[in-house]
Each structure stands twice: as structure tokens, then as C-alpha cells.
Image (tube, rainbow, N blue to C red):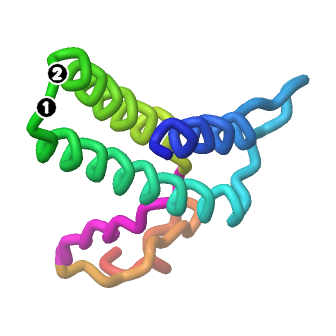
Amino acid sequence: MALLAIGKLAANWLDVYLVFFGEQPQIEPSNITAYRVWGAITLVALLCGVVAHMLNPDRRILGTLWQVLLVLGGAAILVICYIPGAVDLPAPEREDDGYRAPPCYSGGDNDECVGG
């Protein structure tokens, strides 16, 4: 399941950014939704695979290497195939400098501007 989800994330990224002849990439709401859904499925599938592997008493070194590569590759795909707007980050707060006058463009005469 993790490999399918990683493939879907890559296909979604290509759907947005694979453009020809100077066109600009267009991000649609369906691309953002697909990134969120397949990203969550990727994380859950990778986590379940790691937990199942750790709980297996007959672990082998080859299986452990496979899990490590899968987790690293999945994390890399999640970062590389990020679609802008898919993660809602809080906007940084602006510092209030105490100056509230609007900018004034008087054309060279400062008598019309607040503060001269």
C-alpha cells in the first residue's frame, strides 16, 4: 500500500508540474486534496509497516533494510512532491510599529502628507 501511495503522490506532482511550451503550472483543489489524502495514506502505511516489522520475532536484516529504505524514500517523496497550499501553516504575525498613517504620494509636495 505504501508503494501505491508513493506512486500516487508522484503522479499528482507530475499532474501539476509537467507542463509544456511555456505554460504555467496550475494547482487545482483536487491536487491539494489528492496530496493530503495520499500523504496521509503514505504515512499510515509506512508506520504500520515499521510497527509490524518491529513486532515480528523473526526479523531479518534484509527486511530491516527494506523498511529503512521505504521510510526514507517515502519521506523524501512527501517532501519533494509537496503541493503548495496542501499544508495550512499559520501566517506570521506582523509587529506593530505604532505608525498608522497611510503612505502618501503627493508628487513632491509634502504639505499634503501627514507629518510633512
Taking the view exactly as shown, the residue that stands out farthest to the right is 21
Q: Decide: few, some or many residues near mark 1? Use Cα within 10 Å; few <14, some 14-19, many ≥20.
A: few
Residue at position x 74%, y 41% in the image: 15
Query: 12 or 107: nearer the eye?
Result: 12
Image quadrant holding the C terminus, namely: bottom left
Query: Is residue 27 covered in magenta?
Result: no
Could you tell me what secondary structure mostly forms the magenta stretch?
Answer: loop
Q: Position of residue 24 (x, y in %)?
A: 78, 38
Residue at position x 55%, y 54% in the image: 35
**Amino acid type, label 2:** Arg
Residue 70 quadrant: top left
Q: Secondary structure at mark 2?
A: loop
Query: Is residue 94 covered in magenta?
Result: yes
Q: Relative to residue 21, is residue 82 drawn left or right?
A: left
The relative height of residue 9 versus residue 61 in the rendered view (above or below) is below
The residue identified by callout 2 is 60
Q: CA distance from mark 1 to mark 2?
A: 6 Å
Query: 46 or 97: nearer the eye?
Result: 46
Residue at position x 48%, y 72% in the image: 104
Q: Position of residue 96 (x, y in %)?
A: 20, 77
Q: Which mark is residue 5?
A: none
Q: Secondary structure at mark 1?
A: loop
Taking the view exactly as shown, the residue that stands out farthest to the left is 57
**Amino acid type, label 1:** Asp
The relative height of residue 44 versus residue 9 in the rendered view (above or below) is below
Q: Position of residue 59 (x, y in %)?
A: 14, 29
Looking at the rendering, the stretch of residues picked out in magenta corresponds to 84-97
Q: Decide: few, some or many residues near mark 2? Use Cα within 10 Å; few <14, some 14-19, many ≥20.
A: few
The residue identified by callout 1 is 58
